[in-house]
Image (cartoon, rainbow, N blue to C red):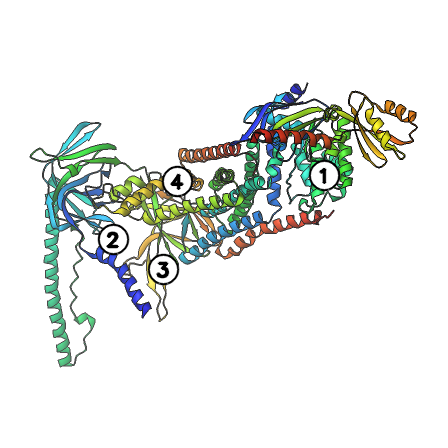
């Protein structure tokens, strides 16, 4: 019984901290900034708690700083400060003062703003409207929403009528014993495409578009006071350069694409591979600034590193393929469809998309087959004018993975040489003990 | 007559000759043992393992994207060999003192500076031989596996010579400071374990979000902040860390960053060698 | 060639060498003697620059040791009392290494010549770890002579050697002396020092007690000369009559053998011979006995220790 008792005691000791973690964290009402910042491809939100002393934003584009009072708490499991917006989410009214080199350079008033997105990614919006455009955008969204609801309603109505008609035809056919064909049935109603626009509610915040630099910001309330937590350093930074990234889809693992954003990154692949390359425009940012921009509570970025941020697919370009000792080829961007193989066996094949027989393409890309002839090649995008696009070059090489044995064989050589040297020396010397 | 005769002999050519003779003897002695060959082989095998891992990944994942697939194998290789040579430097220097052969050397035209530099250059010579082997291995592997040729690889290998110099100089410092061979070895291993422990602790705790002025008086935050500061110091003090950062700079084509880290390592070499010489002068040559 | 001025070395409260003033002239062989713990090795180590003096200076070849150690040592050959070797090297490799260190010309020839002289040549390819103590001492000697140094500093050079080895080393030392080399020997084997040294310095408790030529040393100690006389059946009366001679201090007798102690101002054998002839004594043998170095050493050091002990304990 000693063992199980000891185990129970140890279990309690280990569980207790978890119990402590599970207790509701302490909440305090705090002033925070809720930012909606441009991240190179779209707009995301972030929380700037009082403990984060510096805000980082991309220069030259619109960003929003929304002053709020909320219930702030520290969540030890993820080790970050979180806001309980559901409990409290109050706008703090006032003006935003911006200083540089000790001088006030701007005074910003609160503006209306709204973020909308036409993609399914609800975390990242790709449109920001500020000021007068806000209401128009929101009204437009509401109209689209209403139209969608109306269309949907009409569809359900039509669907209802269609079902009744089909039932009628089938019943008559059964009663009359007549055979019916597809032509006897009415056309089914066309489904309503889903609403492609997503939108948040109209909110208020400070719209900032600043050149590159370091600033100090603070809020001045109507009574003239300045909330201490509103005082922050604001650092704006810009992209370092543009380039092209590729999403690489291997034919044999099309659900697991890889991304190549570094121009100097060589793409290695085993023999006989077929790849599909999808180009994206990308921008390069300083890793430290970007990390802090994306999350003011994340301190993991490094000033001596950079990161590439893709933001939109690259259209209207051809892929130039250069293989040593062969003529340069141009590969067009084409659509492909992943076709399941018939039969009980699992498998698929990737074929060229045929709009007549296929519903929609699975993906678009440049097809590249790596054979013995092109075990090594260089690719680069060419625009419609025939110009090479900077930053789009990549080296692709077949890696001879079947020669792994050679790594170990070569490693043993120094030992063999050493043994030889020592044997040779021992042959020369006499290892005897001389007694007098 | 005697004075003139002596004065005319006091020149740098003789001094340099002494250093090179000591270096030759010490390096010969290392090559007469199997240890260095086993170490080079093990270092290559470890690099092979790392590279083989990349090959397996490529087979499984179909795509492997790397600008410098050989950097990690090189880092592992150079790290292992330099560490071994630093231990050899520690053992050799302290054993010379322990068994009295250092005193015999000092009967001749050898002083503390010549002795330390001789041992230093001996190990560095061996390291360069090991690098030569690594270059051959890397070139053969690059050709056999069809990896992309990289000039940066050579830059890093050359830079690693300076890094190895710092590690070897550290071994010499430990030897003269520690005195007896066993004590010196213990000191060496303790320092290694301390640095490794700090790196591991930093990596484990660095997953925590660091926020300035946390409202919670969590002792682990204080500990983490202290570790961050210590790790920052270690980053500057550790030659391996500096080589790693130099490699990053090479990959990012940051010449100024590369030169900075190279300069730091060179400074470490100078400080460690100078420290070794001064401590040996103070302690004397008798074991 | 070698000069120490007020050379002092203390280890904490213990004074190992006490204001030592030595001067060794070019071309001479100097015996440096003293009882155990006298400070000989400490002095030698300071001359070699291995130990730093607490006070005083050392000049070798006219240059202060502290600042010119590196260049001075190229002209020194040293055999220390306790020598260590690289067990993993052969004798040949070891000597080639030192030849290179001292930039010896034609090292192979030089090594062969020296090793041949002391009969080590056939063991040249044996690892030093397999050498006996005596062989190592001889090898140390060879190492010291490789570069034909102007000054040889030898601390117990023949310790551990068999009689053949001792003779070999002695012959080498005599040759080096004839070649004009300056030799400083510290040894407990006084008979060897006696055979080779021109001058001797005796040190005890860190102080130089006496420094003089062998001849003067023998004369200074005891203040007398001795004549050994073997006469056929000497009577007691004869002994008494010899005692009455003005130049005789005392007589030790054992059967037919007498040791007659005379004043040290002259050689009185002729006078003694005339007296014995006039007495009709049959002389079977007569010779002058010299004070050995060992006797001188013991006398000098014993007296110092007695005085020193007395001063310590207030006798």
Q: Residues within 10 Å of mark 1 (few under 14, many from 20)?
A: many
When the figure is inspected, residue A269 is found, relative to residue C271, above or below; the finding is below
When the figure is inspected, residue B236 is found, relative to residue A378, above or below; the finding is above
Secondary structure beneath disc 1?
Answer: helix
Q: CA distance from mark 1 to mark 3?
A: 87 Å
Badge 3 or badge 2: first in the primary sequence: 2
Mark in the foreground, 4 or 1: 1
Q: Which residue does the numbered mark 4 point to in the structure image?
A: B235
Name the residue: 28% across, 41% down.
A290
Image quadrant holding the N terminus of chain A, namely bottom left
Tell if the residue under mark 3 belongs to the same chain as the one under mark 2: yes
Q: Which residue does the numbered mark 3 point to in the structure image?
A: A350
Q: Chain of mark 3?
A: A
Q: CA distance from mark 4 to mark 2?
A: 29 Å
Q: Which residue does the numbered mark 2 point to in the structure image?
A: A77
Q: Which residue does the numbered mark 1 point to in the structure image?
A: C138
Q: Chain of mark 2?
A: A
């Amino acid at each position: 019984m000693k063992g199980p008792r000891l185990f129970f005691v140890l279990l309690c000791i280990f569980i207790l901290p978890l119990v402590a973690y599970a207790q509701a964290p302490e909440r305090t009402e705090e002033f925070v900034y809720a930012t909606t910042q441009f991240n190179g491809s779209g707009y995301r939100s972030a929380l700037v708690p009082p403990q984060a002393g510096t805000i980082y934003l991309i220069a030259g584009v619109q960003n929003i700083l929304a002053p709020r009072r909320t219930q702030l708490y520290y969540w030890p499991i993820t080790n970050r400060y979180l806001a309980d917006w559901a409990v409290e989410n109050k706008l703090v009214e006032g003006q935003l003062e911006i200083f540089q080199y000790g001088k006030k350079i701007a005074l910003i008033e609160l503006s209306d703003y709204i973020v909308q997105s036409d993609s399914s990614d609800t975390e990242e919006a790709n449109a920001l409207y500020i000021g007068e455009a806000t209401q128009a955008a929101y009204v437009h969204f509401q109209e689209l929403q209403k139209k969608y609801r109306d269309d949907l309603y009409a569809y359900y109505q039509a669907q209802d009528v269609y079902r009744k008609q089909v039932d009628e035809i089938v019943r008559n056919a059964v009663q009359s014993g007549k055979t019916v064909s597809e032509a006897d049935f009415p056309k089914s109603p066309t489904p309503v495409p889903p609403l492609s626009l997503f939108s948040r509610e109209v909110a208020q915040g400070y719209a900032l578009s600043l050149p590159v630099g370091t600033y100090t910001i603070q809020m001045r309330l109507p009574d003239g006071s300045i909330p201490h937590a509103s005082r922050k350093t604001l650092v704006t930074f810009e992209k370092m350069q543009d380039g092209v990234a590729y999403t690489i889809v291997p034919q044999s693992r099309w659900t697991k694409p890889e991304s190549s954003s570094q121009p100097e990154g060589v793409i290695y692949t085993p023999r006989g591979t077929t790849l599909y390359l999808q180009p994206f425009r990308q921008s390069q940012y300083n890793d430290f600034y970007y990390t802090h921009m994306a999350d003011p509570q994340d301190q993991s970025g490094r000033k001596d590193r950079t990161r590439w941020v893709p933001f939109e697919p690259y259209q209207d370009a051809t892929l130039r393929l250069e293989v040593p000792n062969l003529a340069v080829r141009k590969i067009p961007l084409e659509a492909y469809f992943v076709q399941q193989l018939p039969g009980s066996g699992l498998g698929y094949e990737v074929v060229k998309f045929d709009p007549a027989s296929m519903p929609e393409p699975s993906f678009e890309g440049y097809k590249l087959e790596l054979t013995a002839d092109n075990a090594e090649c260089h690719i680069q995008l060419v625009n419609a004018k025939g110009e090479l696009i900077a930053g789009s070059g990549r080296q692709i090489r077949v890696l001879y993975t079947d020669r792994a044995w050679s790594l170990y064989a070569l490693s043993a050589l120094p030992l063999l040489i050493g043994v030889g040297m020592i044997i040779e020396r021992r042959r020369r010397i006499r290892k005897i003990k001389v007694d007098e | 007559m005697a004075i003139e005769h002596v004065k005319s002999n006091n020149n740098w050519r003789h001094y340099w000759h002494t250093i090179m003779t000591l270096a030759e003897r010490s390096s010969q002695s290392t090559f007469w043992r199997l240890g260095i060959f086993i170490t080079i082989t093990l270092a290559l095998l470890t690099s092979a393992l790392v590279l083989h891992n990349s090959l397996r990944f490529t087979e499984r994942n179909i795509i492997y994207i790397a600008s410098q697939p050989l950097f990690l194998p090189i880092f592992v290789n150079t790290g292992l060999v330099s560490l071994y040579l630093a231990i050899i430097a520690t053992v050799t220097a302290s054993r010379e003192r322990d068994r009295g052969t250092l005193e015999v050397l000092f009967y001749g035209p050898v002083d503390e500076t010549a002795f330390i530099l001789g041992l230093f250059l001996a190990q560095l010579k061996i390291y360069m031989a090991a690098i030569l082997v690594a270059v051959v291995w890397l070139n053969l592997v690059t050709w056999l596996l069809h990896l992309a040729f990289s000039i940066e690889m050579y830059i890093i290998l050359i830079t690693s010579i300076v890094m190895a110099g710092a590690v070897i100089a550290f071994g010499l410092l430990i030897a003269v400071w520690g005195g007896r061979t066993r004590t010196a070895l213990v000191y060496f291993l303790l320092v290694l374990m301390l640095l490794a422990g700090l790196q591991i602790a930093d990596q484990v705790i660095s997953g925590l979000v660091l926020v300035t002025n946390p409202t919670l008086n969590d002792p682990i935050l204080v500990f983490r902040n202290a570790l961050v500061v210590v790790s920052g110091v270690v980053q500057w003090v550790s030659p391996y860390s500096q080589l790693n950062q130099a490699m990053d700079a090479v990959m990012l084509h940051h010449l100024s960053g590369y030169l900075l880290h190279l300069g730091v390592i060179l400074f470490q070499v100078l400080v460690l060698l100078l420290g070794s010489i001064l401590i040996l002068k103070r302690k004397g040559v008798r074991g | 060639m070698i000069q120490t001025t007020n050379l002092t070395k203390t280890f904490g409260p213990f004074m190992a060498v006490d204001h030592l003033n030595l001067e060794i002239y070019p071309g001479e062989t100097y015996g440096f003697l003293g009882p155990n713990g006298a400070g000989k090795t400490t002095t030698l180590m300071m001359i070699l620059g291995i130990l730093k003096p607490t006070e005083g200076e050392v000049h070798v070849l006219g240059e202060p040791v502290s600042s010119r150690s590196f260049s001075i040592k190229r002209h020194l050959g040293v055999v220390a009392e306790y020598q260590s070797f690289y067990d993993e090297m052969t004798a040949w490799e070891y000597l080639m290494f030192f030849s290179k260190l001292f930039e010896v010309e034609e090292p192979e020839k030089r090594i062969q010549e020296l090793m041949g002289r002391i009969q080590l040549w056939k063991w040249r390819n044996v690892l030093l770890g397999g050498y006996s103590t005596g062989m190592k001492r001889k090898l140390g000697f060879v190492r010291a002579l490789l570069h034909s140094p102007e000054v040889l500093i030898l601390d117990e050079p023949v310790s551990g050697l068999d009689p053949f080895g001792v003779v070999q080393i002695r012959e080498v030392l005599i040759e080096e002396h004839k070649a004009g080399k300056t030799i400083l020997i510290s040894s407990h084997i006084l008979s060897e020092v006696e055979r080779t040294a021109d001058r001797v310095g005796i040190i005890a408790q860190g102080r130089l007690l006496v420094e003089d030529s062998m001849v003067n040393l023998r004369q200074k100690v005891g203040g007398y000369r001795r004549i050994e006389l073997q006469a056929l059946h000497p009577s007691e009366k004869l002994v008494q009559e010899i005692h009455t001679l003005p130049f005789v201090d005392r007589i030790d007798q054992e059967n037919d053998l007498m040791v007659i102690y005379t004043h040290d101002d002259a050689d009185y054998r002729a006078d003694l011979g005339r007296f014995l002839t006039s007495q009709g004594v049959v002389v079977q043998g007569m010779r002058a006995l010299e004070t050995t170095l060992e006797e001188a050493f013991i006398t000098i050091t014993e007296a110092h220790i007695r005085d020193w002990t007395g001063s310590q304990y207030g006798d």
